[in-house]
Amino acid sequence: MELSYLFNDPPSVQLASERIEADACQFSLSRKFRFYYRFLRPVMPIRIRQWLQKSQSHDVSEQWYLPLSLMDQIRQDRNIKSEDIWPESAKYAFVLTHDVETSEGMQHIARIADAEEELGFRSSWNLVPYKYKIDAGLVSDLQSRGFEIGIHGYNHDGQLYSSKRVFKKRASAINQAIDKYQAVGFRSPMVHRNLNWLQDLNIEYDSSCFDIDPFQAAPGGVGIIWPFVAGKFIELPYTLPQDHTLFIKLGERTGKIWMDKLNYIQKHQGMAMMLTHPDYLIGHRETEIYLNFLKHVRDAGDYWHATPRAISQWWRRRDKLSSAITLSQTKFDLSKT
């Protein structure tokens, strides 16, 4: 599998490739989490799961949401200019995505989509094809209005990557769902990830990676705030902290962390991709924080807003015209991992 980046400086290429190889191409869960997903999670009420998530301690810095180490090295290696990255010299790209985890979440899609459309935005809705009933009429309506449909795993049980055999068997059914709902993008549940295995899916882009997130079952991150080519598809890492992390795990009551991260991404001409859930944007407070953040983005301007598919298509064209070095040229071969 070849990887191709925004930058072509050999030190940065090597650092990024090593980071991605470790984070996204050698995925494995701890024994504790394997036991949890197989035996405990299926019988554990969601309120108990959320209580456990809140009670977990994490030794993180106050700036845990900023990917400082790798980004600092990249900035030293190359002065990246905004006109080299996004259409019309936009300072950054702004992308909205939602993972719909439950049938209750399905019931809140229309309300959130209507509010986004009123503000001038369109988003992607990642649906779990084999867990709950999907409203075909709602899907058709969203697509006719410029929203996008993606596929969110198989049945959201946390076992998609339990073995290569399991993944391959489920990949066939996932590809059927991709075709059924005219989707071109994918995100793994719980953002588990293996970019090599994901090559089996018929997708234009994947969004199972993130730049940095210490609160996931598989923490870490690829360390960069731009898309990159990963074999047959474009990888679009989410770069703004999940609503679940902010509202459920950390009990945040404002959008300050989103604002701080957005400023960081804008400063470095990155991609600001949100990952929220209609399952957690149920209460008035959470919805208000989300919509106020969208209003701030809209009013501030200087961004290119696009759906994930448009981002991936732009990046594919940009990559073909750029002089980015691929890992095949630098003797990195991640297909062996």
Image (cartoon, helix red, strand yellow):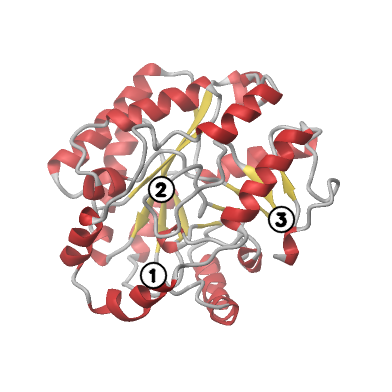
Disc 1 element:
helix
- At x 57% / y 41%, what residue is drawn? 310
Does label 1 or label 3 sit earlier along the sequence?
1
Q: Quadrant of residue 83?
A: top right
Judge whether residue 318 can be spotted in this image. no
Q: What is the number of the mark on residue 33?
A: 1
Q: Residue at x 28, y 65 (%)?
A: 102
Depth check, front residue: 27 or 106:
27
Total number of numbered labels? 3
Looking at the image, which residue sits at the far left? 284
Tell me how far mark 2 sits from mark 1, CA to CA.
15 Å
Residue corresponding to mark 3: 231
Could you say where residue 46 lies in the image, as x and y percent from the top left?
A: 20, 66
> Between tags 1 and 3, which lies in front?
1
Vertically, is 1 above or below 307? below
On the image, the x and y values in percent for residue 294 come to 32, 30
Residue at 36 percent of width and 36 percent of height = 61
Q: Residues within 10 Å of mark 2 (few under 14, many from 20)?
A: some
Judging by the rendered image, the residue that carries numbered circle 2 is: 214
